[in-house]
Amino acid sequence: MRILERIRHSVAAMPDLTLETAYAKQLRVPLGTVCGIDEAGRGPWAGPVSAAAVILNPKQLPKGIDDSKRLTHAQREALLDVIQDQALASSLAMISAQEIDSTNILKATLKAMAMAAQGLNQVPSFALVDGNRTPDLICPAFCVVGGDHLSLSIAAASILAKVARDRLMAEADDLYPGYGFAQHKGYGTKAHQDALARLGPSPIHRLSYKPVAKVLQSFQD
């Protein structure tokens, strides 16, 4: 039975280092060289896509790490500094809405992940990447669908990526008032849809996304 299949059969209620430990043992590398990578913001109509890479210290694991989607805003904010302080290495990267439009969201996401990994202050022995596609890295990489539920390293990366992006969208709310970016973070809520229809696309909207493109066309007609 493959490593990931074996881990899924005994998955804990919260992510842990079981997956990291199993791969590290198989590859005969230190556990403290394993990198987790995750992204935030593939679905929103506005703002960048962000990615983070984290190498946790097995001897100093932050408490309370979980998939960022299962944590409250306050919990994520509190964990950000703890993760960055206690991890052996961490890095963030973002790709703008304009670059998303010029390529596509998949390419932009993989690029952000690769940039995050490259920004680490130590080269990982291998990376666990949330999802079903791996970026082009200088180390081996393994896809883990639903990895933020399984891998502590990926879950830590998910927190960094989401908090960094949420903070940027809160700042965008001041730059482009009226859209409600601080509340919906660029996702396609009813409030966002109404604001978009009223104001038209902002400079950080993803014009290649159909709901935004449709509104842009109506403003140009």
Image: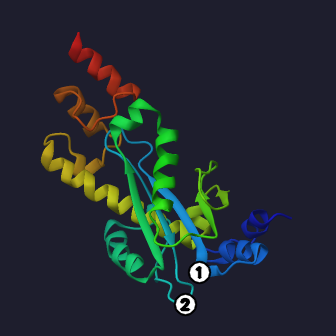
Q: Position of residue 125 (x, y in %)?
A: 64, 70
Colour pattern of the rendering: rainbow
Q: Secondary structure at mark 1?
A: helix
The quarter of the displayed image where residue 124 is located: bottom right
Seen from the viewer's position, the closer of residues 178 and 52 is 52
Local packing at callout 2 (Cα closer than 10 Å; few below 14, some 14-19, many 20+) is few
Compared across the picture, whether 70 is left or right of 205 comes to right
Q: Is residue 197 above or below residue 77?
A: above
| Residue 108 visible in the picture | yes
Name the kind of residue labelled 1 in the image.
Gly
> What residue is shown with label 2?
59
Query: Residue at (26%, 54%) from the top-left corner?
Result: 168
| CB contact under 8 Å: marks 2 and 1 | yes
Q: Position of residue 146 (x, y in %)?
A: 61, 58
The quarter of the displayed image where residue 51 is located: bottom left
> What residue is shown with label 1?
32
Query: Residue at (45%, 44%) from the top-left corner?
Result: 42
Query: Residue at (28%, 33%) from the top-left corner?
Result: 193
Name the kind of residue labelled 2 in the image.
Lys
Q: Position of residue 43 (x, y in %)?
A: 43, 42
Q: CA distance from mark 2 to mark 1?
A: 9 Å
Q: Secondary structure at mark 2?
A: loop
Compared across the picture, whether 166 is left or right of 220 comes to right
